[in-house]
Structures are given as structure tokens and as C-alpha cells.
Image: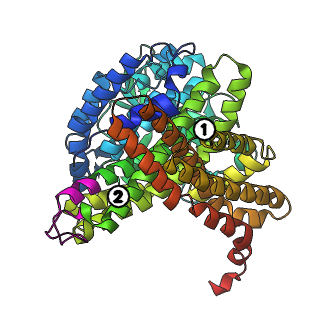
């Protein structure tokens, strides 16, 4: 498998849509100057293409092996991981005060996209570790931070999140793992499933964050606490001590991401796994959400990344595969000249670019919410992050399945053959809609915590910003931009109607609102993505008019934005109708009639 980062598009989105030049002026982000960011992008592309991408297919074929509680990752993974941490890539997203490099989230997102495109299974190790780092940095005691964070940030130790149990699934109120007090520490007893990189051979220690219940805990989610349990105990001098009473009982045999070991973890088969309480008792779910929100945005980025990789493979095949005569042609030609193949490739390209723009812009809102000097701006951007986090996670991952499937279709029959490589992207993408909360969970979060709770304030702010873009497009005399504006206006109207319906029904008929939640999430993603593509087209038109170099890329951006407007934005009206007219039929059948 080959991969080359789409650097032109990444630069365009970072500079002109996400606003990196402004973000680089915020306190703590001054190092994110153009020259440094350019060097980071170029070197990350080199590492992704030369080190990670060649391991993607072999990791998929070979998978991980588990024996006697020990897990071996695919050949090449341990060596690649050593190169990864020696080059400093692991520490890039973390704050400097805990040993990281402190790059803005929007820059780290662009780099993370490269890891995920080149080798999704490999990238999951860093993602989970950085999520655990965030949770400990925000909520652990100074003693626990000093004990665990330096080596986790450096990548010498990795981290996990242990939520799910076989009887509970996504219902964390049913968690049974228990924590027994033992002096100033605790002993854990229980088991967890689906623990990504829960056991492996690439680092010397694994630091597990585990949800468990204290003996006197109240029932439900109010009684869950968060604990940190290392694979090897850590001595006072920082060296590794005895093996803790926790073990990988098995690894899952999965549809995809075979290079990522997904473990069943058993705690306390002997005297109990020694663990330390993070923060206060019974606040574990609140603390874990620090990690989960970090992970949800990153899983949305996985949707972007796998889609980009699938698109690149489809384009490469279409350029080289000679089959039939295109309509109006006299000679056999590459299939990229066939209209329907072009339609499929344009659909993939347009959706990927919209997804990337929305993901990066959401990451940029995180940076503004944390570092902008104006408290009012910080608050507005935090509201935007909260609104769009479930959208980026849900819409980008749902889209990735469709895009990867289209990639197989471009290949025709050989796409269905594993040796081609196109099928791996579809298999790998399939988990992304389930990771860190299914699309249904994201959608319920969107209509409940993010829409109904604030009575549509943040959704209204998004509508206002899209209306401002429509106003900016109005005086531009250009046929492509006029077509884009018309389509975006119609899609925004559909979004406003669906939002009003959702707000009026959420309290009065919550079942009907929930039945329309996933269509509403997809509608929000499509319209927000269309907004970013409209912005991109207007800015590209302006740059062309001012003699900006790379004119071919800018013209392609306008054409791609128009395709999105004419082929993707019409989905907004369908989603609106699903929500406002179709929820009753969703709920109409009796259980026995399914």
C-alpha cells in the first residue's frame, strides 16, 4: 500500500479555513509559525509514507498473536514504534508542562490524519495513550501525574481506556468491576472487553485507566470511579517493579484493524490488581469523558483518514486500469475517462474534502476555546466544539464506510479481492462508527445535551455563520459560486426546519425526536461540510483573482465544491423529510412484527 499526504489541501484548510495564522498568535502557540508547521507536515508525510504505509497491508494480513497473556504485534510494528517515539511524534499533541511539544490541536489533527491514513491500526496506540494522558493531566493527583505522565507522553509507556464489560456494552450504568480499598490504594476485580492496545510488545509498560465501583458506591453511573492500574508496578525511583495482577485473557478476532490488538482484560484473578484512584470517588464517568471527547474527535478524523486512503487507491487504479472505450472515444482508455467512474471519484473527493475541513475547523475551535485572549470568544468556540464533536465523529465515520465502499466499486471485481487492498479500507472503516459510542449514541448526545439543553443557542450560532457566508457569496459574479450559494441556501433552510422540529418535539415526544436523531446528525454534517466547501470556493476564487500560485489546485477546489453543492447538499432535504415526516413510521410496528 502506498500513501502520500494531500499536503496542498491540508495547507489550504489549515491556513484559509481553520485560521492557523491567527491561532499561532495565541499565548503558548507562538511556535506554530509557518516555516515550522511546513517542516512538520513534510516530515510527517515522509514518515507516514515511508515507514507506516508499507506496514499497513502486512499488518492486516498477519494480525496480532496472543499466547499465555502475551501479545505480539505484526512484524515491523515494534521497530516502527521505536522510530515514532525517537522522532518525537508521540509527544507532539501534549502540553509542554507535561513534556509535550504543545502544538495547536489543529496542527496535531493534520499530522494525526497522516498516521491514520497510512496505518490506522498502528495509529490507535498513540491516540489511546494521548487520551489517557489528557484524563490524568486534568484529574489525577500531582503524585500520579509525576509517576505516570512523563513516560506516557514520551511514548515509553502506553495508555488505554477500560470502560466496556460484556454484560454492559455501551450501558456504563451496568459496570460491575469492583475496587476494594487497600490502604492508600485499591485492588481491582473484574473484566473488560474491547480494550484497544490493551496488551502488546511495542512498549515496556501499559497504563490502564479503568472504570470500577467502590463498595459503598451508589447505583448507576453516579457510582463509577476512575482508577489507574499499570501492567507493571512503578517503584519510587521510577523503575518498573512487579507484574500487576492483570492479564490479557485473549484478543478479539475482528473484521478489520487486524494490526491493532483488541484485548479482553482480566483484573484480580489472584490478590487483586493494584490501582490508584483518580480524583474523587464516584466521578469516574465525568473524568473519563475528558478522554472520550478527545477520542471522539480523533475517531472522526479516522473517518477522514480512511476515506482519503481509499480515494487515493481508487484514483491510482482508475488511472492505470485500461478497459473499454469511453463514450465518444475511439480507443480503449483508462477507466478514469468513463463518466460513471468520474462520478464516483468526484463523490469520494468532495466528501473527503468537506470532512477534512469540518474536522480541522472543529479542532481550531478547540484551540480558540483554550487560548483565545477574549473570554467571550473562548465561550463561543467551546459551544461550537460541543455542538460539532458528535457530528464530526458520527458524520465523518458514517461517510467513510460509503466512501470506502465506493472505492471498491471503482476497482470493480478486483476490488472485492483482498490482494488489491481496497477491501481493507472498508473493513477498517467499519469499526469507526462504533468506536467511542455508536452513531446512535452520538446522535442522541447531539439532540439532547447539545441542542435541547441550550434551546438551540449553539445551533443558532452555526446557522448565523452559514448565513454570513451566503451574504459573502452574494456579490460574487461567478457561475460556480452562484450555484454553490443556491444549493447551500436550500440546505440551510432544510437544516433550520429540522432544527425547529427537533426542538419542538424533544420535550413533548422524546421517542419521535430520538427516531430522527441520526438523520439530524447526518443533516448537520452535510450542511456544515457544505458551508466549509462554500467558504473554500469563495476563498479559492479570490486567490485566483489575485494571482495566487497553484492555480490548478484552486480551480479544482472550486469545481469540487460545486460538485458537493449539486450532489451532496440535496441530501439535506431528504434528511429533513426523514425527521419531520418519517419518525412515526419508524416507531409504528409492534416488536413481534419485526
Residue 571, x across and y down, in percent: 57, 63
Whether pointer 1 and pointer 2 mark residues with C-beta atoms closer than 8 Å, the reply is no
Residue 389, x across and y down, in percent: 60, 43
* Residue 153 showing in the rendered view: yes
Mark 1 vs mark 2, foreground winner is 2
**For the residue carrying disc 1, how many other residues have a C-alpha within 10 Å: few (<14), some (14-19), or many (20+)?**
many
Please indicate whether residue 318 sits to the left or right of residue 30 in the image: left
Q: Nearer the viewer, residue 67 or 161?
A: 161
Which residues fall within the magenta stretch?
Answer: 314-335
Closer to the chain start, of discs 1 and 2, is 1
Locate residue 39: give its quadrant.
top left
Residue on which the image places disc 2: 345
Q: Nearer the viewer, residue 201 or 539?
A: 539
**For the residue carrying disc 2, how many other residues have a C-alpha within 10 Å: few (<14), some (14-19), or many (20+)?**
many
- For the stretch drawn in magenta, what is the main secondary structure? loop
Residue for point 60% across, 34% down: 290
Residue 427, x across and y down, in percent: 36, 60
Residue on which the image places disc 1: 288
Residue 359, x across and y down, in percent: 51, 41
325 to 396, vertically: above or below: below
* Residue 266 showing in the rendered view: no
Residue for point 66% across, 41% down: 471
Circle 2: element type: helix
Residue for point 73% across, 41% down: 458
Q: Is residue 317 magenta?
A: yes
Q: Is residue 119 magenta?
A: no
Q: Nearer the viewer, residue 96 or 282?
A: 96
Amino acid at each position: 500500500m502506498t500513501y502520500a499526504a494531500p499536503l496542498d489541501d491540508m495547507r489550504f484548510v489549515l491556513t484559509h479555513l481553520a485560521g492557523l495564522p491567527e491561532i499561532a498568535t495565541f499565548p503558548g502557540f507562538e511556535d506554530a509559525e509557518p516555516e515550522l508547521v511546513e517542516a512538520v507536515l513534510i516530515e510527517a508525510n515522509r514518515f507516514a509514507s515511508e515507514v507506516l504505509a508499507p506496514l499497513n497491508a502486512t499488518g492486516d494480513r498477519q494480525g496480532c498473536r496472543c499466547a499465555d497473556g502475551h501479545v505480539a504485534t505484526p512484524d515491523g510494528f515494534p521497530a516502527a514504534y521505536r522510530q515514532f517515539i525517537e522522532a518525537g511524534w508521540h509527544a507532539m499533541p501534549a502540553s509542554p508542562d507535561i513534556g509535550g511539544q504543545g502544538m495547536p490541536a489543529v496542527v496535531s489533527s493534520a499530522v494525526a490524519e497522516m498516521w491514520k491514513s497510512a496505518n490506522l491500526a498502528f495509529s490507535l496506540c498513540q491516540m489511546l495513550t494521548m487520551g489517557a494522558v489528557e484524563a490524568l493531566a486534568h484529574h489525577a493527583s500531582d503524585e500520579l501525574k509525576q509517576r505516570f505522565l512523563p513516560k506516557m507522553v514520551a511514548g515509553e509507556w502506553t495508555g488505554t481506556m477500560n470502560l466496556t464489560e460484556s454484560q454492559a456494552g455501551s450501558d456504563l450504568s451496568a459496570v460491575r468491576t469492583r475496587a476494594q480499598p487497600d490502604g492508600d490504594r485499591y485492588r481491582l476485580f473484574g473484566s473488560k472487553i474491547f480494550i484497544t492496545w490493551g496488551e502488546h510488545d511495542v512498549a515496556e509498560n501499559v497504563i490502564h485507566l479503568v472504570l470500577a465501583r467502590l463498595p459503598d458506591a451508589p447505583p448507576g453511573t453516579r457510582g463509577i470511579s476512575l482508577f489507574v492500574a499499570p501492567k507493571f508496578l512503578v517503584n519510587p525511583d521510577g523503575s518498573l517493579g512487579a507484574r500487576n495482577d492483570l492479564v490479557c485473557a485473549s484478543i478479539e478476532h475482528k473484521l478489520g484493524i487486524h494490526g491493532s490488538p483488541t484485548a479482553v482484560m482480566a483484573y484480580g484473578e489472584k490478590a487483586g490488581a493494584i490501582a490508584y484512584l483518580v480524583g474523587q470517588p464516584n466521578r469516574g464517568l465525568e473524568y473519563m469523558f475528558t478522554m472520550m471527547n478527545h477520542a471522539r474527535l480523533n475517531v472522526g478524523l479516522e473517518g477522514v483518514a480512511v476515506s482519503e486512503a481509499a480515494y487515493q487507491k481508487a484514483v491510482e487504479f482508475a488511472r492505470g486500469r485500461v478497459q473499454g472505450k469511453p463514450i465518444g472515444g475511439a480507443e480503449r482508455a483508462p477507466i478514469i475517462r468513463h463518466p460513471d467512474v468520474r462520478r464516483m471519484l468526484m463523490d469520494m473527493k468532495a466528501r473527503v474534502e468537506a470532512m477534512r475541513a469540518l474536522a480541522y475547523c472543529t479542532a481550531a475551535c478547540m484551540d480558540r476555546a483554550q487560548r483565545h485572549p477574549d473570554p467571550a470568544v473562548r465561550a463561543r468556540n467551546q459551544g461550537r466544539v460541543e455542538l460539532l464533536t458528535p457530528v464530526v465523529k458520527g458524520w465523518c465515520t458514517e461517510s467513510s464506510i460509503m466512501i470506502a465502499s465506493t472505492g471498491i466499486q471503482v476497482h470493480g471485481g478486483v476490488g472485492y479481492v483482498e490482494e488489491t487492498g481496497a477491501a481493507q479500507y472498508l473493513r477498517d472503516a467499519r469499526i469507526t462508527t462504533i468506536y467511542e459510542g455508536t452513531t446512535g449514541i452520538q446522535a442522541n448526545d447531539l439532540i439532547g445535551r447539545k441542542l435541547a439543553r441550550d434551546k438551540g443557542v449553539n445551533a443558532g450560532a452555526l446557522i448565523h455563520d452559514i448565513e454570513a457566508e451566503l451574504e459573502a457569496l452574494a456579490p460574487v459574479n461567478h457561475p460556480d459560486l452562484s450555484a454553490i450559494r443556491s444549493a447551500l441556501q436550500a440546505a440551510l433552510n432544510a437544516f433550520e426546519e429540522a432544527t425547529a422540529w427537533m426542538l419542538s418535539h424533544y420535550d413533548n415526544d422524546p421517542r419521535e425526536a430520538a427516531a430522527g436523531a441520526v438523520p439530524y446528525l447526518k443533516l448537520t454534517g452535510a450542511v456544515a461540510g457544505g458551508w466549509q466547501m462554500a467558504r473554500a470556493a469563495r476563498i479559492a476564487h479570490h486567490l485566483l483573482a489575485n494571482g495566487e500560485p497553484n492555480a490548478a489546485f484552486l480551480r479544482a477546489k472550486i469545481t469540487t465544491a460545486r460538485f458537493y453543492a449539486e450532489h451532496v447538499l440535496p441530501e439535506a432535504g431528504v434528511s429533513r423529510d426523514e425527521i419531520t415526516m418519517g419518525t412515526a413510521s419508524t416507531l409504528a410496528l409492534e416488536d413481534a412484527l419485526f
